[in-house]
Image (cartoon, rainbow, N blue to C red):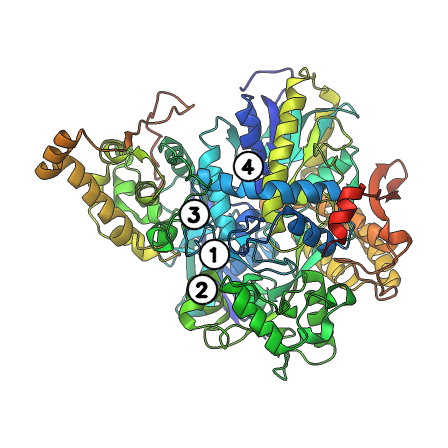
């Protein structure tokens, strides 16, 4: 008789739901996503779950496992507490679609609001020279797999849905653009006024759950906060800018979003249950 | 661009509809949008999750930043040789010529490739490429590419239909007019009316037990095109990537980048002997190192930017050769404990180098395999990875024989011939994604909107609803498991006539079972229903692969026959196998390859 594991998996939709118990046979290396697939194939063919690469690269299979936001494909069954049922529920910050699948469209709407990369002209030989050490930092940010676990765990995203706070994922994207050696747009006014970086009070929950181990707060949000503070609240900088004729980068404006007014706020995520 | 229409379903109208949002689909949609057209982009998953994200090692382009001697002609020659000269030469030529511009364009859109000491794009060695040619970002190049295309694309005006599956193309038999599909979450039907359609749906890896592919890779584009009357070509050529994980079972088949060998990794058997020196074919003998010393000298020199007089390491021979070498070692009892061989990087590079150049590999083995690759060898074995075959297209325009229906990326055939070189898929999807988008835009501009045929749409609706209406029938998940086992065993890495015939009989049985499949529940995000619909596509491409494999009585590239182990210098070196839907079933044809013009032949003959 092979070993088994107990799971409690959320089954439900917008009208409500409950945790249901399942037993699966385990095998070496098994991850939570394997267990979910096993349930789907043999017990509950209608169980809804998102996944793609099953190697921690695509960021599709985000869920809360034993209360912690994680990727199901990177969570080994053998690393969870033995003898205890494994509880799997969908991300709580986003409206549920069905079972483990949530409506993450908030993130895709937010992405559209960020003015895109705009590079300076190429060098004379047609290349763009950049030193590796100058891009190491933002290459770290670009490891982001858009699993949205940082958005899920962020209490500002959870609590301040109507404030249009961008959330850690998009502050990291804004930091990437701000630190990109080739970019020519100044998005700092937007970072402050539209994407509300001031709402982040650096509890670092996002960094803790990041499956790519990106130092979201220390390397991204805090430096971005400092740059915004320097631009808008530093009297010396203000005086220098006056003398020098202002900052060199072109001021960014919100892109036209097809869904409505320029830069209109995407509908915030609306949790449907506690 | 939504409009109320004569259909009873939600209907959208676009000039160009792109199906599939991996690299090829995104690049096609960006191109068509740049022509000021209304573009719809449909994808089965969320945007940015397509299988391109899993590409690791790099994108091949003869930029010449690391080795100034490199140019498109060398890249073209390497590609044709890797494909054992069965490639459509014109596609391989366009690819080699345009890849550098496509890579530079990604920088313009924000991509950040690793840098050379003088600040340009760094390029690494890869199997079958004469010079260091692969622009890369550590071992997550695909993620960088798809995110760049996605972040650029969403500001180009296209409309993205996420988590939407197309189950049928709509045509009048000769000309495309749209597509029928369903929203995965609600299960509601949706009709697209389009003047041109680009298929960019990727591969078919899910037909095999051991594969590196995501659930999406079910041959949708190939099957949709086939059902609509287009031809498939080169379907016998399946690339088994030499290095998939073999242990533990949970991750069997998960990809390990060729970049490990590009960074110096070596393949060894259980006796710690480097295996590849015993498997150098005549075709590559002149350019491959014959001793470990020479191989190591080449690696040292070529990666430091200095010209090397030594020849390339056999660990970086093309994938088909390496995969079969591993297969042979294992069959001969010289494999690793779990049925693979050892891939060693820890004795070759410092722990710091490994973590910097191969961070995803380090992470993947540590988390999923309990192996620290800076201290221990990996166990690796072949995994179904990429299909060279696909929809037959015009080399200049990527148009299929259905007017207005285009294909690009992995679901199109011709570019890679019998075997694809690593790194050529990411460049393929950029080059041909753009070309398909361009010509789809031209076709759309030159044509009127076609009216839809209500009968055709009703047929498509009945087809996808049928699994709900049966009182009983097989479980689609278990049928899929069955298919994967049969394809792995009978149409796998080494084939025989008997196996292939048995495989076709099994496919026949599975086809009959699939036609009786039953699903429970309703249409709301119903995974078993989605699986039932994807099964039709997997069965079509599986049958095409088995029939083409039976036809080609030789071994070449990603098609190996135990009963015909040699590469044929005669008939089969001059034909591609095509497949088309006919009244009596799948019709196989051998079509002449056609000789390239003199100036191309001259490039091929240079060394």
Report which residue position mark 1 lands on: A56
Report which residue position mark 3 lands on: B112
**Residue B24 lies in what quarter of the image?**
top right
Both on one chain, marks 2 and 1? no
Secondary element at tag 1: loop
Whether residue B345 sits left or right of residue A219 in the image: it is right
Depth check, front residue: B508 or A223: A223
Both on one chain, marks 4 and 3? yes
State the image coordinates of residue B61 (x, y, percent, origin top left): 58, 48
Q: Are marks 2 and 1 in contact (CB under 8 Å)?
A: yes
Q: Which mark is residue B363?
A: 2
Report which residue position mark 4 lands on: B26
Both on one chain, marks 4 and 1? no
Q: Are marks 4 and 1 in contact (CB under 8 Å)?
A: no
Label 3: chain letter: B
Q: Are marks 2 and 4 in contact (CB under 8 Å)?
A: no
Q: Which residue is located at x 79 percent, y 58 percent?
A: B556
Give the Cα separation between the discs numbered 3 and 2. 21 Å
Position of residue A82 relative to residue A253, above or below, is below
Give the Cα separation between the discs numbered 4 and 1. 22 Å
Depth check, front residue: A177 or B204: A177
State the image coordinates of residue A65 (x, y, percent, origin top left): 40, 57
Quadrant holding the C terminus of chain B = bottom right
Give the Cα separation between the discs numbered 2 and 1. 9 Å
Position of residue B582 relative to residue B60, above or below, is above
Both on one chain, marks 3 and 2? yes
């Amino acid at each position: 008789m092979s070993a088994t594991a107990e799971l409690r998996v959320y089954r439900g939709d917008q009208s409500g739901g409950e945790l249901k118990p399942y037993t699966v046979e385990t095998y070496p290396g098994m991850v939570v996503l394997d267990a979910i697939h096993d349930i789907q194939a043999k017990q509950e063919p209608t169980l809804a779950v998102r996944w793609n690469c099953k190697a921690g690269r695509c960021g599709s299979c985000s869920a809360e496992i034993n209360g912690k936001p994680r990727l199901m494909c990177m969570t080994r069954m053998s690393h969870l507490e033995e003898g205890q049922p494994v509880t799997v529920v969908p991300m709580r910050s986003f409206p549920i679609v069905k079972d483990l699948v949530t409506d993450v469209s908030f993130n895709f709407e937010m992405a559209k609001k960020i003015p895109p990369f705009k590079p300076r002209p190429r060098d004379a030989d047609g290349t763009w020279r950049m030193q590796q050490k100058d891009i190491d930092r933002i290459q770290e940010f670009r490891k982001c797999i858009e699993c949205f676990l940082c958005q899920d765990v962020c209490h500002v995203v959870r609590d301040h849905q109507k404030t249009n706070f961008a959330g850690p994922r998009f502050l990291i994207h804004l930091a990437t653009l701000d630190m990109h050696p080739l970019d020519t747009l100044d998005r700092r006014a937007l970072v402050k006024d539209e994407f509300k970086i001031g709402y982040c009070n650096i509890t670092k929950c996002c960094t803790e759950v990041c499956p790519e181990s990106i130092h979201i707060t220390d390397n991204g949000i805090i430096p971005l906060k400092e740059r915004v503070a320097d631009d808008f609240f530093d009297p010396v900088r203000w005086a220098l800018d006056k003398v020098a004729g202002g900052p060199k980068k072109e001021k960014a404006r919100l892109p036209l979003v097809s869904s409505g007014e320029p830069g209109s706020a995407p509908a915030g995520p609306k949790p449907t249950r506690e | 661009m939504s409009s109320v229409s004569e259909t009873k379903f939600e209907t959208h109208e676009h000039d160009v509809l792109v199906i599939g949002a991996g690299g090829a689909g995104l690049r096609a949609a960006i191109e068509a949008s740049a022509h000021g057209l209304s573009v719809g982009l449909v994808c089965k998953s969320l945007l940015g999750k397509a299988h391109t994200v899993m590409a690791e090692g790099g994108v091949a382009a003869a930029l010449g930043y690391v080795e100034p001697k490199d140019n498109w002609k060398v890249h073209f020659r390497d590609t044709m040789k890797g494909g054992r000269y069965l490639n459509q030469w014109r596609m391989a030529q366009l690819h080699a010529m345009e890849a550098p511009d496509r890579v530079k364009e990604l920088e313009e859109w924000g991509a950040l490739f690793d840098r050379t000491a003088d600040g340009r794009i760094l390029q690494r060695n890869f199997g079958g490429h004469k010079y260091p040619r692969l622009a890369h970002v550590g071992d997550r190049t695909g993620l960088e590419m798809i995110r760049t295309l996605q972040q650029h694309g969403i500001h180009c005006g296209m409309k993205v239909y996420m988590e939407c599956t197309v189950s049928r193309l709509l045509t009048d038999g000769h000309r495309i007019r749209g597509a029928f599909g369903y929203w995965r979450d609600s299960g509601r039907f949706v009709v697209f009316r389009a003047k041109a359609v680009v298929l960019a749906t990727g591969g078919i890896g899910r037909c095999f037990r051991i594969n590196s592919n995501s659930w999406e890779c079910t041959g949708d584009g190939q099957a949709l095109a086939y059902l609509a009357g287009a031809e498939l070509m080169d379907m016998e050529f399946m690339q088994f990537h030499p290095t998939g994980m073999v242990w533990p079972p949970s991750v069997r088949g998960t990809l390990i980048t060729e970049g490990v060998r590009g960074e110096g990794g070596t393949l060894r058997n259980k006796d710690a002997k480097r295996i590849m020196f015993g498997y150098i074919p005549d075709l590559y003998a002149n350019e491959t190192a014959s001793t470990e010393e020479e191989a190591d000298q080449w690696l040292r020199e070529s990666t430091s930017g200095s010209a090397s007089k030594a020849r390339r390491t056999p660990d970086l021979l093309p994938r088909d050769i390496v995969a079969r070498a591993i297969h042979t070692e294992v069959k001969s009892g010289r494999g690793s404990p779990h049925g693979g061989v050892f891939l060693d990087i820890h004795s070759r590079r410092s722990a710091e180098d490994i973590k910097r150049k191969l961070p995803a590999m380090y992470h993947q083995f540590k988390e999923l395999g309990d192996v620290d690759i800076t201290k221990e060898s990996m166990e690796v074995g072949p995994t179904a990875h990429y299909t060279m075959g696909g929809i037959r297209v015009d080399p200049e325009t990527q148009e299929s024989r259905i007017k207005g229906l285009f294909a690009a990326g992995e679901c199109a055939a011709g570019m890679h011939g019998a075997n694809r070189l690593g790194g050529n898929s990411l460049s393929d999807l950029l080059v041909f994604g753009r070309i398909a988008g361009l010509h789809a835009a031209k076709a759309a501009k030159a044509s009127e909107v076609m009216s839809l045929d209500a009968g055709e749409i009703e047929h498509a609706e009945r087809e996808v609803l049928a699994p709900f209406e049966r009182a009983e029938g097989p479980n689609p998940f278990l049928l899929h498991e069955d298919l994967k086992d049969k394809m792995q065993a009978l149409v796998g890495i080494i084939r025989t006539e008997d196996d292939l015939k048995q495989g076709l009989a099994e496919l026949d049985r599975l086809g009959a079972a699939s036609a009786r499949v039953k699903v429970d529940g309703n249409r709301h995000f119903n995974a078993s229903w989605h699986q039932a619909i994807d099964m039709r596509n997997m069965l079509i491409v599986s049958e095409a692969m088995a029939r083409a494999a039976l036809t080609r009585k030789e071994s070449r590239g990603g098609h190996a026959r135990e009963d015909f182990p040699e590469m044929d210098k005669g008939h089969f070196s001059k034909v591609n196998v095509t497949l088309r839907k006919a009244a009596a079933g799948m019709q196989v044809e051998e079509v002449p390859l056609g000789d390239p013009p003199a100036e191309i032949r001259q490039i091929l003959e240079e060394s």
